[in-house]
Image (tube, helix red, strand yellow):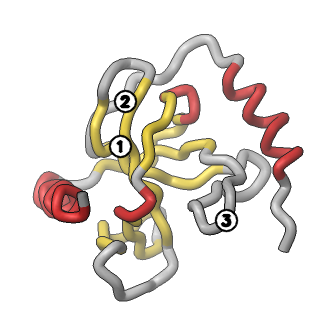
Amino acid sequence: MRKDFDGWNEKKKATNDHAHAPLYHERDIRWCHLGTNVGFEQDGTGEGYSRPVLVLKGFSRTVCLVLPLTTSAKRNPFHISIGALEGREAAVIISQIRLIDTKRLYKKIGTVDSATFRNIRKAVKDLL
């Protein structure tokens, strides 16, 4: 299947033009304009080229480290379950960790509980 890089480029321009990044916190689950990416990098989907992400670490109002979420059930050490999200079982993909500009973030859809967040942080540290 051919990826829509041209469509994403138009959305990326509009996303970049946003004046203010939203306030966010670690442990937030938010929709994020991840875009269309190369090869097996995790893509956003739909009109907004979006996917839920977990905010792992905030560095400033404008930059944070996120983990994309998936609802695909896979048993491997890089997928860590966070439980149900909007009625579907979800997991973070720690191998797809990435730094983003917070202009990509929008609607908050949940918060990961403290114990699960600690487990995710440990798994990321072990990965790196």
Disc number at residue 24? 2
Point out residue 102 in the picture as x, y percentages from the top left corner: 49, 28
**Mark closer to the chain start, 1 or 3:** 3
Disc number at residue 39? 3
Please, which residue is most extreme toward the top here? 19
**Mark closer to the chain start, 2 or 1:** 2
In which quadrant of the rendered view does residue 6 lie?
top right
Secondary structure, mark 3, is loop
77 over 85 or under it: above or below: below
In three-dimensional space, the C-alpha distance between marks 2 and 1, rounded to whole angstroms, equals 8 Å
Q: How crowded is mark 1: few (under 14 residues within 10 Å), some or many (20 or more)?
A: many
* Foreground tag (3 vs 2): 3
**Amino acid at pointer 1:** Val
Q: Which residue is drawn at 30% across and 26% down?
A: 59
State which quarter of the image contains the C terminus. bottom left
12 over 84 or under it: above or below: above
What residue did someone put label 1 on?
Answer: 55
Secondary structure, mark 1, is strand
**Mark closer to the chain start, 3 or 2:** 2
**Amino acid at pointer 3:** Gly
Check contact, mark 2 vs mark 1: CB within 8 A. yes
Q: Residues within 10 Å of mark 3 (few under 14, many from 20)?
A: few
In three-dimensional space, the C-alpha distance between marks 3 and 2, rounded to whole angstroms, equals 29 Å
Q: Which residue is drawn at 67% across and 23% down?
A: 16
> Does residue 45 appear to the left or right of 6 in the view shown?
left
